[in-house]
Image: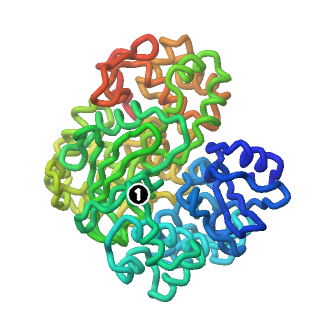
Amino acid sequence: MHTETERCVRAVQSKDARFDGWFFTAVLTTRIYCRPSCPVVPPKPENMTFYPSAAACQQAGFRACKRCRPDTSPGSPEWNRRADLVARAMRLIGDGIVDREGVPGLATRLGYSTRQIERQLLAELGAGPLALARAQRAQTARLLIETTPLPMAEIAFAAGFSSIRAFNDTVREVFALAPSDLRTRAPRNGANATGSNSTGTPGVLDLRLPFRAPLNPDNLFGHLVATAVPGVEEWRDGAYRRTLRLPYGHGVVALTPRPDHIGCRLTLSDLRDLTVAISRCRRMLDLDADPVAVDDQLRTDPVLAPLVDKAPGRRVPRTVDEAEFAVRAVLGQQVSTAAARTHAARLVTAHGDPVDDPEGGLTHLFPSVEALAALDPEALAMPATRRTTLTTLVTQLADGTVHVGVEGDWAETRAKLLALPGFGPWTVEVIAMRALGDPDAFPTTDLGVRYAAKELGLPSTPAALTARAADWRPWRAYAVQYLWATGTHPINFLPDRPHQPSTPQVPAKRRRQAPKDIP
């Protein structure tokens, strides 16, 4: 979008927050870059130039605005909508791969040469992988400087810098302040755009996760809570809490829906995991989506329009661990939500790593695929065919034959999953929707989707419904959220709110069952 000058100028002049993260405004006279919704008086159009990323602005010699804090914008929705090389690379960079494995590690994960990746990122984003990772480190450093009392040396290495000098130089270049001055000027009233003052407990941070409005939290948190695995997830005091398996350690996160942000309290065993933890929480809650674009497309269908108008801004609930969700999808085949939670809880108790939750309630990390690959199949209390399905899946996830991570190619991953015994269209599309993050995933064989379609007068057979839903593309995963919302199942509601379906009800007992998958 940054090449559409007139459109960008209109967005800046109207201070339109919908475009935050889509592009950045660099002011030639002040050498400052801002988000489109910056509250200051807009510069003259001839003094504006536009960049596709904060990293590109920094490489061009611009520093971040202290007023609008452009580095705290929601991420571009492009990286969650697309499955091409650039989008996959951006998802991996957001997950901290460059800091942990370098550009060669990024290239290995994607199956391309470092030169190809650098060339494509430069062409589209105006910055290579090192510059993009550096911009991310700068944001993490600012967050730790302003919200914790940690010594600067600890912050430098927690943010991913290799030396104190690189840390100091980057902070000065990006924010035009020394690290100590940045801490001195930090807001003291907790109203910071992404963080509030430290709780005083080591490893605990209170943050604010921004999103593009509107956001409907009911199905988002309702789904996560209704399917929560005991010991790993819970709903407490208005917050969804869960444990996190992270590259350097583990964590516990509490996510609370607010009118203009998501409250996020992170407890980390190693602060080097901060960037990854934030990225995974944002991905799970689909916070970088563009709800206006999604809802505008779905409103063109007269059947969906009333559902969208009544409760706009529905997100697709995703996951913080793609392999974990794939396992849970298999556990949920042909059984109720309660039964799936029971199966998962048994695995957690027997094979999950114990963690200390400062607030109690959470006891384990979900088992790693390596731990599950080593278990005795006979110990699984499930039919033999599903045991085979589960053990085959975890073995291939553990040895790398199948990848369901953010770097995966959606079409290739679907094909590999369909080749596994016990995997049919429902399992594959549910994994594509919630683990791979494909916004066009469409589980037409899901009973809840079929019953909702029938109640709304849509075709209920998979082939006919697929044809009818062609106009919903590329947002069919979001259309599923609106179809599911016609029922009274707990997945559609925050636990503290009464259950009121938005349209004719879908029977709750049938609501979340999946049809039998055909191998």
Number of numbered discs on residues: 1
Q: Quadrant of residue 144?
A: bottom left
Of residues 230 and 393, the one nearer the viewer is 230
Is there any visible trace of residue 369 in the rendered image?
no
The correct choice, above or below, for 492 with respect to 227 in the image is above
Measuring from the top left, give residue 336's x and y in whole percent.
27, 29
Residue drawn at point x = 34 percent, y = 79 percent: 151
Residue located farthest toward the right when viewing the structure as drawn: 46
| Quadrant of residue 126 within the rendered picture | bottom right
Q: Which residue is mark 1?
A: 195
Q: Residues within 10 Å of mark 1 (few under 14, many from 20)?
A: many
Q: How is the image coloured?
A: rainbow
Residue 514 appears left or right of 140: left
Residue shown at the point (68%, 68%) measured from the top left: 56
Image location of residue 165, percent across then percent down: 49, 88
Q: Secondary structure at mark 1?
A: loop
Image x and y of residue 344, in percent:
23, 45
The image quadrant of residue 372 is: bottom left
Say whether residue 110 is visible: yes
- Left or right of 6: which side holds 35? left
Name which residue lies at 63% across and 64% down.
Answer: 54
Quarter of the image with the C terminus is top left
Identify the residue at image location x=38%, y=55%.
Answer: 189
Amino acid type of the residue that numbered disc 1 sits on in the rendered structure: Gly
**Camera-side residue of 276 and 510:** 276
Q: How far across and down, in percent of the image, does residue 176 sit?
A: 58, 75
**Left or right: 66 in relation to 156:** right
